[in-house]
Amino acid sequence: KVTYPKSFFMLRGNHECRQLSAFFNFKDECLYKYSEKLYEAIMDAFDNLPLAAVVNESFFCVHGGLSPDITTIEEIDDLHRFREIPRDGPMCDLLWSDPFEEEKSGRDINNNDDSDSDDDSPAETMWFGYNKTRQCSYVYGVEAVKQFLEENKMTSIIRAHEAQVDGYKMQMVNPQSKIPRVITIFSAPNYCDVYKNKAACLKFDNNVLNIKQFIETPHPYYLPNFMDVFQWSLPFVAEKVTDMLASVLDYNCDEAEGHESTMLEKRGGMLKKKVMAVSRILRVYKILRQNNESILTLKQLLPKNQKVPVGLISKGPEAIKKAIADFESAKAFDAKNEKHPEAKRVTKKEKRGSRRFSKSGKMSTSSQSFTPMSVDIVIEEEGKGAGKL
């Protein structure tokens, strides 16, 4: 941005705020390596980032997606963006909302059933419904997307906000033009060193959308959450200490059998319980030592002051490896971190959502006759040739 101020533009995402940078580890890293003054300067820069952009007068670019309180792109200019991201409202929606995942629910997005009886009714999934994954904002359906694009004469929405195993995802494809109305681009390969996903970037040139995939490159080894070498070595030290303690208890038990059988009968049960307790601790620390790398990898998914889930370590190496075995496993383990950190009790009325433009809305004549531009989409894998969709 400093080098190319007039041709390089950055948009604000939901993590570019004080609340989430403190909830996760960015603030701690700034304080650990630099100073609070630098952290506040970065937060001020985040407050000045634009919320959305239009590329080539055809593609609406935003981090999250649509808001039921925004009908036209011009209305975004009226928002007061120079502030912390609010918990709800149109500014929140632009950064937190997600497209409705039809394959997760098994519901056909082309179903024209207008039933409006509950939260998961077609009306909610075709227009706007409560975003259960994020615990804030909305999911937006194909009808909301169609009306927004037609009202603003846009071809597609290009957004981020969700990790994708291939680095991109095309949704709500226009059956006539075969152009996806929503394209999700995720540009962090092997997210958190756990997801094992590809990443992608998108280039638009001469009516061709070129999606280039790439994979991770090795980075210097580091310990998560500013852990020092002493903390890293604790599992090894603890295993040896508990091993020594178990040996001492076992030795005392054997000696008592030969010399103080009466006392042993009285204390045998107590000693047996202690030995069993130490044995369990020994097993846990052995697992910690043997799977130290995997546990450190899991910790990278956790916000500060949060621990690996209770019981996971005691289940053994297989359970630990399974938690980070593939993209879906890592995504499931990380799901709780996708929610808004500020808990809020949501009423059923709020879940059902605002419908400023909905199935009862009317589009202008000009927007009804709008035809999206024709584009070709090319997927280019790293180390392989390009393939045209």
Image (cartoon, rainbow, N blue to C red):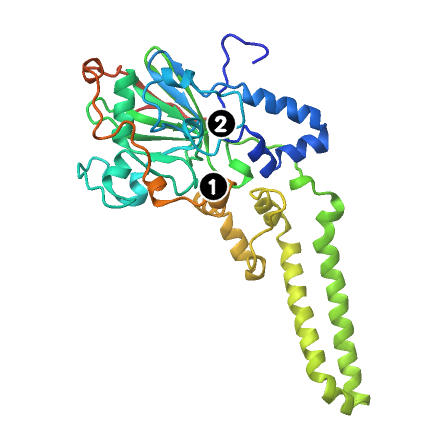
Query: What residue type is disc 1 on?
Result: Lys
* Quadrant of the drawing holding the C terminus: top left
| Badge 1: residue crowd in 10 Å (few <14, some 14–19, many ≥20) | some
Tell how many labels. 2
Residue 83 - label: none
List the residue tagged with mark 1: 339
Above or below for 168 versus 129: above
Placement of 126 over or under 176, stated as above or below: below
**Badge 2 element:** loop
Q: Residue shown at 70%/32% (left/top)?
A: 31
- In this view, the residue farthest toward the top is 6
168 left or right of 372?
right
**Percent coordinates x, y for residue 388 in the rendering:** 31, 23
Viewed as shown, does residue 162 lie left or right of 103? Answer: right
**Residue 235 x %, y %:** 70, 55
Q: Secondary structure at mark 1?
A: loop
Q: Amino acid at mark 2?
A: Gly
Residue at (75, 56) in percent of width and height: 237
Residue 220 appears in the rendering: no
Residue at which label 2 appears: 13
